[in-house]
Amino acid sequence: VQLQASGGGLVQPGGSLRLSCAASGLTFSDYAVGWFRQAPGKERDFVAAISRSAISTYYANSVKGRFTISRDNAKTTVVLQMNSLKPDDTAVYYCAAVRAGDRDSVYARASSYYWWGQGTQVTVSS
């Protein structure tokens, strides 16, 4: 199983970035997916999650209304659209996947996830 996160970069405050998580080696529609982020010297924090079915989504309060998570099971990809970015959003962003029996469940705890991508750096600075 491989999860490949991409799309990070340097953006000014108020700007947007689109992160992608491409999955391979698994039956993607059986897996719930989440995004987490880790800033230097801080713990890894939950950002957003989406269920197998894509019906359910869940966001950290800090990103609600600014970030949108979506998935395309045919393309085995999850996208995190990030708008109105702030310097506090600066971190390495990781996608993670877990095989989920319930098609509509989402998971906000890092310990719930089994497979992790390598991370992509997002820097928000003027």
Image (spheres, rainbow, N blue to C red):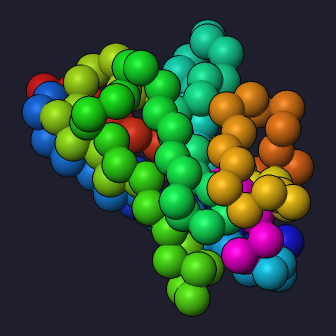
> Which of the image's four quarters has the N terminus?
bottom right
Q: Residue furthest top?
A: 41
Q: Which residues are magenta?
A: 28-33
In the rendered image, residue 126, in percent from the top left (x then y), is placed at 13, 27
- The mark total stands at 0
In the rendered image, residue 76, in percent from the top left (x then y), is placed at 61, 79
Residue 124 visible in rendering: yes
Q: Nearer the viewer, residue 31 or 26?
A: 31
83 sits to left or right of 14:
right
Residue 111 among magenta residues: no
| Position above or below: 72 against 53 | below
Residue visible at 34% across and 30% down? 64
| Position above or below: 91 against 67 | above
In the rendered image, residue 118, in percent from the top left (x then y), is placed at 68, 52
52 sits to left or right of 66:
right
Residue visible at 82% across and 78% down? 26
Residue visible at 74% across and 29% down? 109
43 sits to left or right of 83:
right
Say which quarter of the image contains residue 30: bottom right
Say which quarter of the image contains residue 5: bottom right
Q: Nearer the viewer, residue 77 or 37?
A: 77
